Image (tube, grey):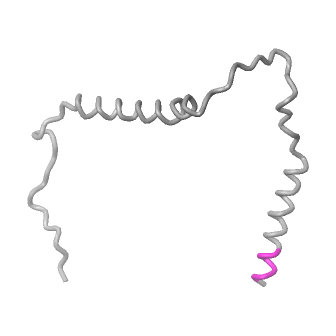
Amino acid sequence: MEKKNALRAGALAAGTTLMMLLMSSPALALTRDDGDDPGPGLSVAQTLGLYVGIPIALFVIITGLVVVLDRSQDKHRFVSRNVDVKTKA
């Protein structure tokens, strides 16, 4: 019975994938639309800087600001010193 269910699920997944591939239209990247005016492409360095470098730099800047501007003091932090963490065996 499990073999039949697995075969049915596989056939359904394959059929769905095939139908989606057949029904999807091509990207038509070479056909220009009305008002389409693409600019020059980005180099590899520009692409890496834009999609990798800038997000990492923003993360570092925000993290640094949070650490530097953290004004919480030790007296505001709750630390319990009389907690027994040993398990009783």
Q: On the rendered image, what quadrant is the N terminus found in?
A: bottom right
Give residue 35's quadrant in the image. top right
What percent of the width, then of the height, locates residue 9?
A: 79, 70
Is 20 drawn above or below residue 7 in the view shown?
Answer: above
Q: Over which residues does the magenta segment extend?
A: 2-7
Q: Nearer the viewer, residue 88 or 49?
A: 49
Left or right: residue 39 compared with residue 1:
left
Left or right: residue 16 compared with residue 42:
right
Which secondary structure type mostly characterizes the magenta part of the structure? helix
Is 14 drawn above or below residue 35 in the view shown?
Answer: below
What percent of the width, then of the height, locates residue 70?
A: 22, 32
Left or right: residue 54 compared with residue 12:
left
Check if residue 3 falls in the magenta segment. yes
What percent of the width, then of the height, locates residue 65?
A: 29, 29
**Residue beneath the point at 25% across and 34% down:** 67
Q: Nearer the viewer, residue 82 or 42?
A: 42
Q: Nearer the viewer, residue 22 or 3?
A: 22
Give residue 26's quadrant in the image. top right
Give the total number of marks visible in the rendering: 0
